[in-house]
Image (cartoon, rainbow, N blue to C red):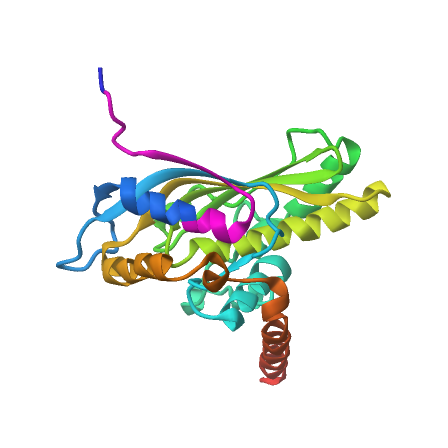
Amino acid sequence: MKSALALPVICVQADNLAEGWEQAVVDTWERGARIPTQYDKPGDPPSRDVSLMLSVSDPFAEPRIHRALPGGIYDLEVYRQEVVDGIHDHWIDPEAGKWSYTYHERLAAYTKCPAGESVNQLELMLEALAEAPHTRRAQAILWKPGTDQTDEHPPCLQRLWCRVFGDELVMSAHIRSNDAFKAAFMNMYAFTELQKMLAEQLAQKLGRDIRVGQYNHIVDSFHIYGSYFKEFEGFLQSLERRTLAQRTFTTEQIAPLIEEARERIAASLARENSTP
């Protein structure tokens, strides 16, 4: 009988998003299985990999943002708008060598085939929850069999699932593959912003207050790439030197940067729309 798992399973419970992500990546570094990836370059050490179950009791509790997020606040806001508002859905054009999908497009305009009729899965989720808030059937899928298997970069997010407990909307994001250090925090941030939007829209349908509840981030392969190891070791050293307050931002602290980012994004989209 085996006494150890080939792929360790990490379970993390946290009060806020920043601490939850931080604990998840540290646990992955300490306990992750060593395994190569399809993106390794010659000389890269094998990745450290786990299956993750992260639950955040209040994803909008402060501090909400970790300073070690990839890129900056502008990139974070761009990604939020891509997921929640679909600002770059018009970039989808695989025949021209552009994007083959966006998360928003798969959620709000899913098609079974390129020429098929689109389905707004987010609206269907809201209708199901409005009819029976306790339903276990409010979900949206992203994978397209026969298409995504041959895509060089198929969607990592596979499914969203929601259910109302009392007056709180709980959401689970199920992910097949998640870059723990360079992508996961931005994913969590954007997905919880989508959770917030759904809660607000459901509240309107039900005619009562629905708050954002627990967020679950469930990943089959939560990994740290070998090519990032030196950078990640620097991140670990920063945890020893800095307090939690020095490692994180509150939403209020970055509010001016978010507003500036929104203005820049709006200007960029306006330029795109004015270009023939």
Q: Residue at x 61, y 45 (%)?
A: 58
Image x and y of residue 137, in percent: 64, 31
Image x and y of residue 135, in percent: 69, 29
Image x and y of residue 130, in percent: 78, 37
User: In terms of image quadrants, where is residue 52?
Assistant: top left
Q: Residue at x 47, y 64 (%)?
A: 246
- Does the magenta run of residues contain 11? yes
Quarter of the image where the C terminus is located: bottom right
Q: Residue furthest left?
A: 43
- Does the magenta run of residues contain 10? yes
* Number of residue marks: 0
Q: 103 or 4: which is nearer to us?
A: 4
Q: Is residue 56 left or right of residue 39?
A: right
Q: Which residues are magenta?
A: 3-22
> Taking the image as drawn, is residue 53 in sight?
yes
User: In terms of image quadrants, where is residue 255?
Assistant: bottom right
For residue 3, above or below residue 18:
above
Q: 121 or 161: which is nearer to us?
A: 161
Q: Residue furthest top?
A: 1
Quarter of the image where the N terminus is located: top left
Q: Is residue 149 left or right of residue 202?
A: left
Q: Is residue 18 left or right of residue 223?
A: right
Q: Is residue 246 left or right of residue 160?
A: left
For residue 262, above or below residue 85:
below
Image x and y of residue 266, in percent: 63, 77
> Taking the image as drawn, is residue 155 in sight?
no
For residue 252, above or below residue 10:
below
Q: Residue at x 48, y 65 (%)?
A: 93
